[in-house]
Image: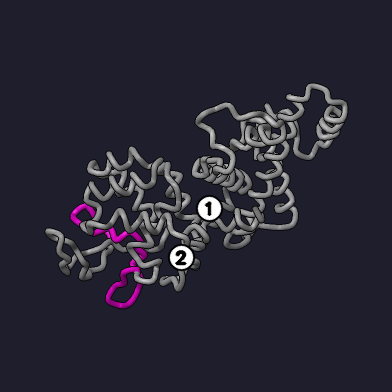
Amino acid sequence: MTIPSNISQNAVDFHGLNQLRESALKSENEANTLRQVAAQFEALFTTMMLKSMRQASLAEGIFDSNHSKTYREMADQQLAMDLSQRGGLGLQDVIVRQLGGQTNTNANMPLPGQTFSIDTVTIRQDLRRAVKEIHENSQDTDSKEILSGTEHKNFPQRFKTPEEFVNHLWPLAQQAADKMGTTPEVILSQAALETGWGRYVLKDGEGQSSFNLFNIKADSRWDGEFVAKNALEYRDGKPIAEQSRFRSYDDYAQSFEDYVSFLQSQPRYREALKYVGDPETFVEKLHEAGYATDPQYADKIKRIMNGDTLAQISHKNIQNLGY
């Protein structure tokens, strides 16, 4: 991994921390010292979060060793330090206000006893980008080529629980979300609705999975494999069973890739894609564009997305920190 040259302090250099301690004891430039302390706290918090996210990963890579783990830990610490020095995740200002005893004069800020609102979606996206950068830069090209052909082959054709569904598919959903500029939660919520948390993925006549997580139909634009099934469609508000053909893939990775390509290549979804940064509006616009005929389609996705089940699973890495 190439470390940016404009980093003013190395994570493994404790000389700067000693200077900060001496400055605090002498009360020299208190405001600046407080800001530096806040940056150190934020860097520590980010490092802990990155470590927890790595511990929540599916498995170790085939090239992992004690040496590579040590290198990743050092890279994580350096990245956390770099993020904090470039503005961080928005926690520095909160820490400065708390430690500095500043009076809140902003009428838009919450009163005592009210909850301070932090943009958690933005924070999660920043962390995902950070982890993605570490992952991409800590593996050489050869290892990427080897893993790309094997890492998704051991997924079950049918998931038994929502936890298994999310834990297995989260990395693929995150890749798709990065391409679209949205969150993995909204993509997994739609897949969960379409397949009953992976328990009812469409199968062919021989019982083999189609790996179609989003029930994308195989119309004239599709020249690949397909499965024919009766599907529930809503006509004039009434549910009707209709025979339809659905796309079939080799694995779940292809399903996510085709989902992104399908939305981005269809003119009718252009309006919906303008709202990928607002997941709830995105699914509403997706429904309005005709992705599904169920009149409650968008509401059902939002209930899954905002429900306890997905939240408890997808945020377990943060909960493990004990905050």
| Residue pointed to by mark 2 | 165
Stretch of the chain drawn in magenta: 201-224
The reply to whether residue 223 is visible in this rendering is no
- Mark 2 residue type: Phe
- Mark 1 residue type: Glu
Give the image location of residue 160, x and y in percent: 45, 73
142 or 75: which is nearer to us?
75
Q: Mark 2–mark 1 contact, CB under 8 Å?
A: no
Q: Residue at x 28, y 48 (%)?
A: 286
Q: Which mark is residue 145?
A: 1
| Local secondary structure at mark 1 | helix
Disc with the residue nearer the chain's start (2 vs 1)? 1
Give the image location of residue 124, x and y in percent: 53, 45
Q: In the rendered view, tell whether residue 70 sits above or below residue 158.
A: above
Most frequent secondary structure within the magenta stretch: loop
Give the side of residue 52 with respect to residue 312, left or right: right
